[in-house]
Amino acid sequence: MGLGSRFHRLFGATLVSAVGTGMHAAALPLLVLQSTGNPLALSAVVVAAEIPWVLLSLHAGVVVDRLDRRRVMVWADLGRFAVLAALVVLVLTERVNLVWLVLAAFLLGVGQVFFDIAAQSAIPDFVSRDPRGLATANGRVAAAESVGEDFAGPPLGSALFGVGTVLPFAGNALSFAASGLLIFSIRPDAGKKVSGAPRASMRSEIAAGIRWLFGNRTLRALAVVSCLGNVAATAQFAMLALLATEVLDLPDFGFGLLLTATAIGATLGGLTAAAAARRLGPGTVMIVGKAGVGVAILVLGLAAEAWVAAAMMAVTGALMTAEKVVVSTLRQQIVPAELLGRVLSSSRLVVMAGGPVGAALGGVLAGVFAVQVSYVVAGGFLVLVALAFYPVLNNRALAGAADEQAA
């Protein structure tokens, strides 16, 4: 179905910036090690890039709901362009050090928080709230992110870094400039119209978003099940390098191929999620997808052949991305437009809380028992999660929630 020029410009901006982000994600660790030679420095940069989600996501949700979402995305792109332009100058003048790298990673993370929440909240503004259009749009955006950040960007960034240290960062800066120009070209009336009514305090607006999230039975279930899914997914990915080298006996490039298989699966999952949801229903896609990911993780832990592991990684990527598309579509249908940024940011924070738990549990199980045990436990856990949430997230329950909101 046609999604209109406004969405296609958002899609183009997402794709081009995702490629740049993938380039940066591969090149930044190389620059850190080249500049410092210290693995702890690499950890500091990774933490700096991730911590803005914890510190600022709730505040970003308020900003996104208060302002024109198109402008929020443009300013986020301009800010990230400026950060990378400064980093390029530091690299060229050989003045880059750990302090600048940590600061750059943090500021880029801040920009990503605001851009991602604004972009996800703007999709209903650009497409309408028709579930078919929303699912198609969310699927294409998810596929674009996977292609750019996981498939095309990282190898391109690594290759460019080998040619010239500054090239991947310059390329990422240009990608943000192009993304900002595409978003800026969207008609202003496609974005959020700012109300002249007096504003409540930021704290009360954050609280309103949290109350809406946990006060709605379906949204609450979606947030909790996604958080529990993130526990298992993070445990899987945290131990993947160990599984690849010690169990599957793969060389370094073999580990990269497993990640590539995941990216291919994620791209296919994003492109087919809308059709699957129309044919099977969103509840079926979500519950069967969650259970299917659990089975795939379990089989991955028992696999002795590399091709089986690669197939399971592809299945995991496809089903997880299809679930993500369904969850995003349901949230956009249920939440009022003026609250979408805050509810989305609150949901993201809940989901992210599962990441550190999963990484820690995966490491403990692998250390005390064996790395395969962490996969078997994580996979079995996800199957149980799917069964436990079936009464709340089956097709009939979700259709009732949508009808209730429409009324």
Image (cartoon, grey):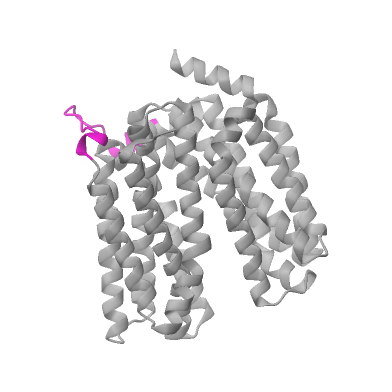
Picture quarter with the N terminus: top left
Q: Nearer the viewer, residue 403 or 280?
A: 280
Residue 69 in the image, given as x and y percentages of width and height: 28, 41
Q: Nearer the viewer, residue 323 or 342?
A: 323
Residue 104, compared with residue 348, is above or below; it is below
Q: Which residues are magenta?
A: 187-208
Residue 294 in the image, given as x and y percentages of width and height: 73, 46
What residue is drawn where x is 57% and y is 41%? Answer: 272
Residue 224, compared with residue 218, is above or below; it is below
Q: Nearer the viewer, residue 362 or 189?
A: 189
What residue is drawn where x is 53% and y is 49%? Answer: 352
Instruction: Name the side, left or right, on which 28 lies relative to 150.
Output: left
Within the image, what quadrant is residue 323 found in? top right
- Furthest residue toward left: 196
Question: Is residue 195 inside the magenta stretch?
Answer: yes
Residue 132 in the image, given as x and y percentages of width and height: 48, 29
What residue is drawn where x is 67% and y is 34%? Answer: 287
Question: Is residue 405 inside the magenta stretch?
Answer: no
Residue 193 showing in the rendered view:
yes
- Furthest residue toward front: 1
Instruction: Name the side, left or right, on which 295 lies relative to 399.
Output: right
- Furthest residue toward top: 407
Residue 365 showing in the rendered view:
no
Number of numbered markers: 0
Residue 21 in the image, given as x and y percentages of width and height: 41, 63
What residue is drawn where x is 39% and y is 78%? Answer: 98
Picture quarter with the C terminus: top left
